[in-house]
Image (cartoon, grey):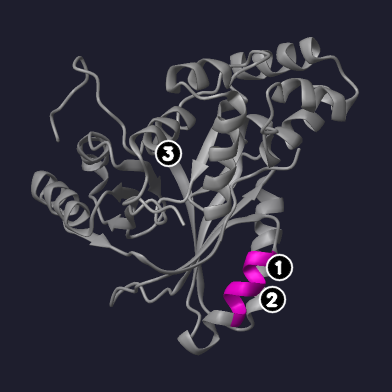
Amino acid sequence: MDDKDKELLNQLQIGLPLSERPYGALALQLGLSEEDVLHRIRKMKEENIIRRIGGVFDSSKLGYQSTLCAMSVPAGKTCEAARVINGFEGVTHNYLRDGDYNIWFTVIAQSKARLADIVSEIQQRTGIEVHSLPAMRKFKIDARFHT
Amino acid sequence: MSTMQNLSEDDKKIVEWLQGDIPVVSDPFHALADELGFSVCRLLKRIEDFQEDGILKRVGAVVRHQKIGFDANAMVVWQVPVSDIESVGALFAEQTFVSHCYQRETLPDFPYTLYTMVHAKSESECLSYIKTLAELAGTINYKILPSLKEFKKSSMKYYYKRRKDESNEHY
């Protein structure tokens, strides 16, 4: 990545201009040609630096419910538990972490009832207690990275 | 104000499209506008409405932060007394290296009230950021939970219509 790529990536994380030719508008800001911008973005996608270009929604404003779950899974059973957990479409993040509670995953569902169903199904299928810790207050969500 | 209840079928199509990967072509909005029978201008206006209503936070690149050097990340949980949550939460949220800061319910054996995600370019940088937060918070207990393995990371699909060939195992 050169400096122009970094600048482009920073701009692209702030936002794709909402115009007929958004990449052309970015090109103008950065002093590049539209063709060059398209090429640089395609390359960063190929290199997996950019996961996708799209909308980031506020799940709660769309009426969805979310939670973070913690489990204390014996060392030999973490992969099997992860496989069960990952099978649910509403599970968006799932990590093995250091600590007594070692599996942490997030779930998003269309209703509180559906969320509770997913949590209890994971509990039932793994045979391990799932602790749901919904957010009581969100102070910040901003997963953008300045390069 | 747009809520889930009053989004039209066209709106839901726009939401669904925006959750995909916007094509990297000169006029990426054109095909969807055609499909909806809209002008591009009308489509863009609707997307701006979503942003104003807050249902859409932004349209832009989602990066793999590990790929641009942010490969030292930790979840850090803090035992902030509920009376101080407001001020400590606001202070933490101001730090650029904090991507997420939430107050959550506690467990009897896990009394942490405030959850943060810290992102850094090295282990030592990550620890120094955590130290900064600890100084801001004052004398409180906290616990660092580094991630040992990523089992899954994906974007949620809202109003996603599953194709026939996709698994319906859980739904």
Which image quadrant is residue A60 in?
Answer: bottom left
Q: Which residues are magenta?
A: B87-94
Q: Residues within 10 Å of mark 3 (few under 14, many from 20)?
A: few
Q: Which disc, if any, is residue B132? A: 1
Q: CA distance from mark 3 to mark 1?
A: 26 Å
Chain letter of mark 1 equals: B
Name which residue lies at 30% across and 73% down: B107
Given residues B150 and A28, the one toward you in this image is A28
Q: SS at mark 2?
A: helix
Where is residue A92? Give x, y as percent.
37, 41
According to the image, label 3 marks what residue? B149
How many labels, in total? 3
Q: Amino acid at mark 3?
A: Lys
x and y percentages locating residue A7 in the rendered image: 81, 32
Label 2 – label 3 distance at C-alpha: 29 Å
> Dot 2 corresponds to which residue?
B135
The type of residue carrying mark 2 is Glu
Residue A3, percent across and down? 86, 27
Question: What residue is at 28 percent from the left and 77 percent from the top?
Answer: B108
Please report whichever mark, 2 or 3, sits nearer to the chain's N-terminal start: 2
Whether pointer 2 and pointer 1 mark residues with C-beta atoms closer than 8 Å, the reply is: yes
Q: Secondary structure at mark 3?
A: strand
Q: Chain of mark 3?
A: B
